[in-house]
Image: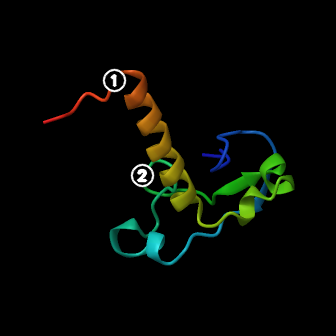
Amino acid sequence: DGRCVICDSYVRPCTLVRICDECNYGSYQGRCVICGGSGVSDAYYCKECTLMEKDRDGCPKIVNLGSAKTDLFYERKKYGFKKTG
């Protein structure tokens, strides 16, 4: 939808995103990197992320998954590690 896969900016898409084969296999083929919906357009890094070389950190799906797990850890820590189940 025109957002940068790293910083979610809608401004100045610059570099085409490359996804590793493992993230684009089977039922994940042709899916959106960010939300997992059906992919309707190409994904891009914004100009700022390209200048900061964040486009070279690796597969954006893996990078975003790692940051999402880190965010979840600190969010749960803030509310006291309530166990589910």
Q: Secondary structure at mark 1?
A: loop
Mark 2 Cα within 10 Å, few/some/many (few <14, many 20+)?
few
Q: What mark, if any, has residue 28 been given in the picture?
A: none
Which residue lies at the image location 43% right of the left edge and 56% below the top edge? Answer: 38
Left or right side of 75 for 81: left
**On screen, 72 above or below 51?**
above
- Mark 1 vs mark 2, CA separation in Å: 32 Å
Task: Tell me the quarter of the image containing the C terminus.
Answer: top left
- Single out the residue that lies furthest toward the right: 51
Of pointers 1 and 2, the one earlier in the residue sequence: 2
Query: Please, what is the three-letter code of the amino acid marked with disc 1?
Result: Gly
Write down the residue under mark 2.
37
- Whole-percent x, y for residue 63 in the image: 57, 57
Query: Please, what is the three-letter code of the amino acid marked with disc 2?
Result: Gly
Circle 1 or circle 2, nearest the eye: 1
Which residue lies at the image location 73% right of the left edge and 65% below the top edge? Answer: 56
The answer to whether the residue labelled 1 contacts the one labelled 2, judged by CB atoms less than 8 Å apart, is no
- Single out the residue that lies furthest toward the left: 85
- Whole-percent x, y for residue 77 in the image: 40, 29
Q: Nearer the viewer, residue 60 or 2?
A: 60
- Whole-percent x, y for residue 69 in the image: 44, 46
Q: What mark, if any, has residue 80 been given in the picture?
A: 1
Left or right side of 1 for 29: left
